[in-house]
Image (cartoon, rainbow, N blue to C red):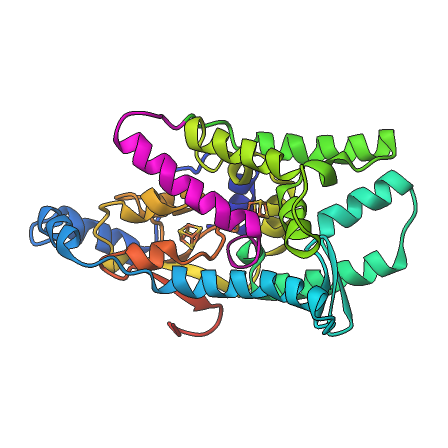
């Protein structure tokens, strides 16, 4: 899949069926259509009996909680390792600033602040290398609370009490432009007030505030109406990191030959459109990288019973 097509899908386009496939992909698809393919019924039965594996989720939660605790400890113990909050911080003296939030501040003030520019360059290099939306699943505190809300949503949906209402993913681009326009026209970066990442990050450092009620409201909306709505359809910060990490070397790799196409990965993924390549007959190459909207959360790696999805660093073979 080309980079441009991947970015188009991230901005809201529906993933397309490939018009052409590599020779190896054609051979593998044909082999799966024939006799002797994977016995999916048996596989699902085995999966039901197997203990769930949460290796990547546990690693991720440990890092996410550790990073956010470091903000709190740096403030309370005055150890100056990681100062500030996720919107703007200093790590061991290096300025870090969230790119989209900095853009809004500069648009609102109509002034280019040197500290913010330095901070965004550091963030640009760091997350461009690690993999854009890895920020979401490995650092963002809203991601963690939204994961718990998602578990509740899935449980209630299984009981038929709630239903997921999907919204067009393109609205995220509309919100991105709208918040920027509002900042420029009103001189006030409204998004920073409603941004749940900033609210939670500040609450962890400076103590709880009434703004937490807004985060609670968002979570209730996600539980009862639309699964992971903020991250999927609104958050311009997630979108910025997605674009930033479009060519990042760290990514999730799909291996067609091993895939049983039972679709467990798409059920756990926050952005399941990136896993459309796992649908039967869809992959156009034997090994493919999933799109830039992927948060590198590792849930699909944990759940895939045939190890068809792996963490990969571009240029290196399977390393993890
Ligand atoms: S999309 Fe936004 S709120 Fe969601 S995890 Fe990413 S940065 Fe956090
Ligand atoms: S593709 Fe896998 S690693 Fe990426 S967001 Fe979905 S579940 Fe997480």
Q: Is residue 237 left or right of residue 296?
A: right
Q: Position of residue 5 (x, y in %)?
A: 52, 44
Residue 58, by quadrant, is bottom left
Residue drawn where x is 7% and y is 54% of the image: 36
Q: In terms of depth relative to the viewer, which is nearer, 279 or 117?
A: 117
Residue drawn where x is 54% and y is 51% of the image: 3
Range of magenta residues: 136-164
Q: Position of residue 286 (x, y in %)?
A: 32, 58
**Is residue 23 shown in magenta?**
no
Q: In terms of depth relative to the viewer, which is nearer, 123 or 48?
A: 48
Q: Is residue 95 left or right of residue 57?
A: right
Asked if one can make out residue 48 in the rendered structure from this viewpoint, the answer is: yes
Residue 50, by quadrant, is bottom left
Residue drawn where x is 90% and y is 42% of the image: 109
Residue drawn where x is 53% and y is 58% of the image: 134
Q: Position of residue 309 (x, y in %)?
A: 34, 59
Quadrant in which the C terminus is drawn:
bottom left
**Is residue 148 shown in magenta?**
yes
Magenta span: predominant SS is helix
């Amino acid at each position: 899949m080309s980079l441009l097509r991947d970015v188009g899908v991230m901005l809201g386009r529906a993933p397309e069926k490939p018009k052409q496939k590599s020779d190896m992909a054609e051979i593998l698809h044909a082999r799966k259509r024939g006799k002797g393919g994977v016995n999916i019924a048996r596989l699902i039965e085995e999966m039901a009996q197997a203990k769930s594996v949460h290796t990547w989720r546990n690693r991720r939660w440990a890092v996410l909680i550790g990073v956010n605790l470091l903000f709190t400890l740096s403030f309370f113990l005055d150890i100056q390792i990681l100062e500030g909050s996720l919107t703007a911080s200093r790590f061991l003296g290096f300025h870090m600033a969230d790119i989209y939030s900095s853009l809004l501040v500069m648009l609102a003030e109509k002034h280019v602040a040197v500290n913010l520019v330095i901070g965004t360059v550091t963030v640009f290099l760091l997350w461009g290398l690690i993999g854009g939306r890895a920020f979401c699943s490995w650092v963002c505190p809203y991601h963690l609370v939204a994961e718990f809300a998602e578990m509740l949503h899935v449980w209630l949906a299984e009981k038929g009490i709630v239903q997921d209402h999907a919204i067009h993913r393109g609205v995220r681009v509309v919100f991105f432009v709208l918040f920027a326009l509002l900042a420029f026209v009103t001189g006030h970066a409204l998004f920073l007030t409603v941004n749940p990442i900033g609210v939670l990050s500040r609450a962890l450092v400076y103590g709880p505030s009434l703004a937490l009620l807004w985060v609670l409201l968002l979570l209730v909306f996600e539980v009862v109406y639309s699964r992971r709505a903020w991250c999927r359809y609104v958050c311009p910060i997630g979108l910025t990191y997605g674009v930033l990490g479009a060519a990042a070397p760290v990514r999730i790799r799909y291996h067609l030959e091993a895939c049983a196409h039972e679709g467990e990965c798409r059920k756990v993924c926050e952005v399941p459109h990136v896993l459309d390549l796992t649908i039967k007959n869809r992959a156009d190459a034997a090994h493919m990288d999933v799109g830039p909207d992927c948060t590198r959360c590792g849930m699909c790696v944990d759940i895939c019973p045939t190890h068809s999805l792996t963490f990969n660093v571009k240029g290196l073979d399977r390393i993890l």
